[in-house]
Image (tube, rainbow, N blue to C red):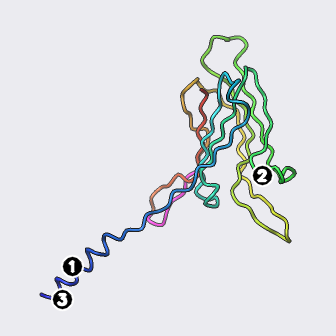
């Protein structure tokens, strides 16, 4: 009986020592001037297959007026010639200027990993390209990939939401 009581006490003590998974940091990338912006295009990018520091990224592109076209880098400026270049275009249908829908074409290259080979830093990127029509203020999932974990549960491990504000 004494052994069982000690076992229960030890078990209860261990139950209090739970390990919590640390959430990856959110990397905020802003393109353009917020002060002059009439709108913003937001991409919430999540990729569990990327290195820890690149798993959660939020890209905000400030728009002065429609139509708008922007080119920018999604990684360290010292890596310009390594495939980091990204672009976004946004416009409304000229035949329906009062429409709440906006067309967005994007070619984004999000960082996944930074490798070093022969002393050279090489980024590994995940490219997303598409053209979608979205409503102002309504988030829309524009890409997603799923996988199955070791228990057979379906897990969404790469997803991107787009929102026009």
Magenta run includes residue 146: yes
Quarter of the figure with the N terminus: bottom left
Q: Could you tell me residue 158's position as x and y percent? A: 59, 51
Q: Could you tell me residue 41's position as x and y percent? A: 65, 31
Q: Which residues are magenta?
A: 145-151
Q: Is residue 151 above or below residue 107?
A: below
Q: Could you tell me residue 66's position as x and y percent? A: 73, 20
Sequence-first disc among 1 and 2: 1
- Which is nearer the eye, 66 or 5? 5
Sequence-first disc among 1 and 3: 3
Residue 9's image quarter? Answer: bottom left
Q: Is residue 44 above or below residue 61?
A: below
Tag 1 near tag 2, CB within 8 Å:
no
Residue at 75 percent of width and 29 percent of height = 89
Graded by Cα atoms within 10 Å as few (under 14), some (14 to 19) or many (20 or more), the crowding at tag 3 reads few
Q: CA distance from mark 1 to mark 2?
A: 53 Å
Graded by Cα atoms within 10 Å as few (under 14), some (14 to 19) or many (20 or more), the crowding at tag 2 reads few
Secondary structure category for the residue under label 1: helix
Residue at 44 percent of width and 65 percent of height = 151
| Mark carried by residue 3 | 3
Graded by Cα atoms within 10 Å as few (under 14), some (14 to 19) or many (20 or more), the crowding at tag 1 reads few
Of all residues shown, which one is farthest toward the front? 35
Secondary structure category for the residue under label 3: helix
Query: Where is mark 1, residue-wise?
Result: 8
Q: Could you tell me residue 69's position as x and y percent? A: 78, 29
Residue at 74 percent of width and 46 percent of height = 74
Secondary structure category for the residue under label 2: loop
Query: Where is mark 2, residue-wise?
Result: 76
């Amino acid at each position: 009986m004494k052994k069982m009581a000690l076992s229960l006490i030890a078990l209860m003590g261990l139950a209090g020592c739970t390990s919590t998974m640390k959430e990856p940091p959110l990397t905020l990338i802003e393109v353009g001037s917020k002060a002059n912006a009439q709108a913003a295009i937001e991409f919430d990018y999540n990729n569990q297959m990327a290195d820890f520091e690149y798993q959660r990224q939020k890209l905000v592109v400030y728009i002065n007026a429609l139509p708008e076209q922007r080119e920018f880098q999604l990684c360290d400026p010292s890596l310009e010639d390594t495939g980091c270049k990204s672009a976004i275009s946004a416009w409304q249908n000229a035949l329906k200027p009062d429409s709440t829908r906006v067309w967005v074409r994007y070619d984004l290259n999000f960082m996944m990993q930074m490798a070093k080979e022969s002393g050279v830093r090489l980024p590994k990127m995940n490219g997303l390209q598409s053209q979608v029509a979205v409503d102002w203020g309504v988030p829309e999932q524009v890409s997603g990939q799923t996988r199955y974990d070791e228990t057979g549960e379906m897990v969404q491990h790469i997803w991107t939401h787009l929102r026009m504000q």
